[in-house]
Image (cartoon, grey):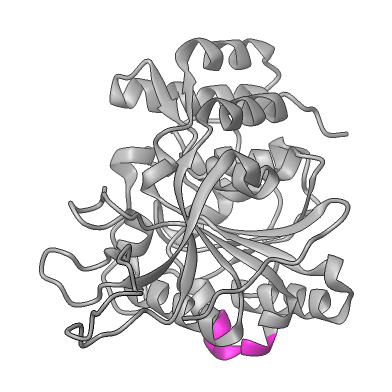
Amino acid sequence: MTQQTVPPVSGPLPVILDVDTGVDDACALLLAGLHPGLELRGVTCVGGNASVDEVVWNTLKVLDIAGRADVPVARGAARPLLAPVSHARHVHGDDGMADLGWPPTERQPDPRHAVQLLRDLLGQAAAGGPGDRVTLVTLAPMTNIALLLRTYPECAAGLREIVVMGGAADVGNATASAEFNVWHDPEAAAMVLESAAELEVPVLMYGLDVFYDVLVTREQAAALIAIGGRGPAELAGRLIEFQSGRFGQAAVTIGDAGAVCAVIDRAGLTTNSLPVRVELAGTYTRGRTIVDRRDWSGDIAHDPHGMAPTAVQVALSVDAARYAGLWLRTVTIERR
């Protein structure tokens, strides 16, 4: 079992987001684009919550609203490696991002495929010093990342860590067993974990065990909307308002944005290093992340599979108020 340590960094932390924007991806993009502790170097898009083309336009729109037209956005895989396409409009709206009806962006995506953009950005990071290494935050099915690490494994030299919003130790949402991002392309998720072990890249899994805990209320959303101007704060409030109305709840999760909070403020998260595999064949469990909590010091010779080769830092609890406060403070920043 491979367990890697994350090298320290001083100054803003270089990050790349891989997204399927998505209401909560939009919440995460606002945080990553606005927080002074992060240097957002690029965003890659994949089909998931919506079609890949809708994801691209949603992503460009969010970054424009955040004042981050400088961040390159690239279109990636339109479908999973093997599984059929299955979007989540019932959660995120017909356009994949809360059906706001705001004017579309006029900006065009980067002409490179997402895998090529990732290769270029990570190659640049690898050529620099340790402080240039990038934290890759995957908030979507991991199709792009699997293609990258299998096609250009040398890119791992530019990675500091992979933070995965996906999986769970105990629960599912797409099915009773599986979380959506992993379930949507389980082969890709398995390939990323295997590649991370082979290439010695540390992995943090921010899964459903903590995903639903970081909440923002309708009242807090209303206060953001009242700032107005169709800026980051109003967008953030309307995303929360949409989710609150759709699910009839007084408070809703910031979802993927919590994984970005974990990059900014790891001390708000409790993790444990555990072996993790992805189930690829189960009738009822396909896409489940098998998080092994057994005591491997005992006699377990009866297990024909042995220990999973990848040790993942699995998030098991979160300081929810701390992360909600971090997100709320950041989305009120007007970047100039």
Residue 62 visible here: no
Task: Name which quarter of the figure residue 297 lies in.
Answer: bottom left
From this view, report whether residue 334 is shown above or below residue 259.
Answer: above
**Taken as a whole, is the magenta stretch helix, strand or loop?**
helix
Residue 146 % position (x, y) = 49, 78
Q: Name the residue located 40 percent from the left edge and 75 percent from the top edge.
A: 188
**Residue visible at 73% across and 66% down?**
134
Q: Is residue 176 magenta?
A: no
- The residue under the point 82% across, 77% down is 124
Identified at 60% across, 85% down, the residue is: 199
> Which residue is most to the left?
283
Within the image, what quadrant is residue 296 found in?
A: bottom left
Residue 131, horizontal then vertical, whole percent: 85, 65
331 up-or-down from 117: above or below: above
Work out whether 302 lies above or below 222: below
Q: Give the camera-side residue of 330 and 310.
A: 310
Q: In which quarter of the image is residue 4?
A: bottom right
Q: Nearer the viewer, residue 53 or 159?
A: 159
| Magenta stretch holds residue 152 | yes
**Magenta stretch in the rendered image:** 148-154
Q: How many labels does the image show?
A: 0
| Any part of residue 118 in sight | yes
Q: Quadrant of the C terminus?
A: top right
Q: Is residue 160 left or right of residue 244?
A: right
Give the percent coordinates (x, y) of residue 198: 54, 87
| Image position of 163 (left or right of 64) | left
Q: In this view, does 281 lie to the left or right of 236?
A: left
